[in-house]
Image (tube, rainbow, N blue to C red):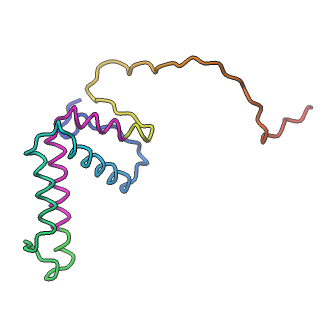
Amino acid sequence: MNQSPQQQGKPDLPAKSGMLSDLVRQLRLVWRLYWDSRVPLWVKTIPTAALAYVIWPIDVIPELAVPLIGALDDLGLVLLGLTTFVNLCPPDVVQEHMQAILGESGWTVTKPDQPGPPPEPKVIEAPYTIQPEKDKPKDPQP
């Protein structure tokens, strides 16, 4: 299956993942990548410039002249800058940070071009005991 460069290496997220949680996850990814020393300095200028545009007093479409559209151009430019930043970061570094972010929630990242079945899960052997369920009513005897 052919995938675009933007789709390669992206994790398979659950279908119930909400827009707000996706936004928070992406912002966490950008934050982690920005402070990673393996990301080139010139790439780090992209989100810095996008945020500087938002606070710069001179604007292409002023918020006071056209209130809704003036805010949307700022939002669009920031989103474009952050997306470009993530796409220009080294893919293995992005993958590592996304794995760490998703690992905190119990999700896993799989590469779409990874051949063969997924690796077997690690088995931890330890003694265990079965505890009786206290809240479950017992079945009546016939």
Secondary structure that dominates the magenta span:
helix
Q: How many marks?
A: 0
* Residue positioned 41% across, 42% down in the render: 14
Q: Is residue 96 magenta?
A: yes
Q: Where is residue 26 in the image (x, y as percent from the top left)?
A: 29, 49
Q: Position of residue 80 (x, y in %)?
A: 16, 55
Residue at the farthest bottom position: 65
- Report which quarter residue 9 is drawn in: top left
Q: Position of residue 59 (x, y in %)?
A: 9, 72
- Report which quarter residue 140 is drawn in: top right
Q: Position of residue 29 (x, y in %)?
A: 28, 46
Look at the image and tell me in which quarter the N terminus lies.
Answer: top left
* Residue positioned 31% across, 39% down in the render: 98
Residue at the farthest right position: 142
* Residue positioned 60% across, 18% down in the render: 126
Residue 30's place in the image compared with 53, above or below, is above
Q: Which of 3 and 94 is in front in this view?
A: 94
Q: Does the magenta stretch include residue 98?
A: yes
The magenta-colored residue range is 73-101
Q: Is residue 58 left or right of residue 114?
A: left
Look at the image and tell me in which quarter the C terminus lies.
Answer: top right
Q: Which of 100 and 118 is in front in this view?
A: 100
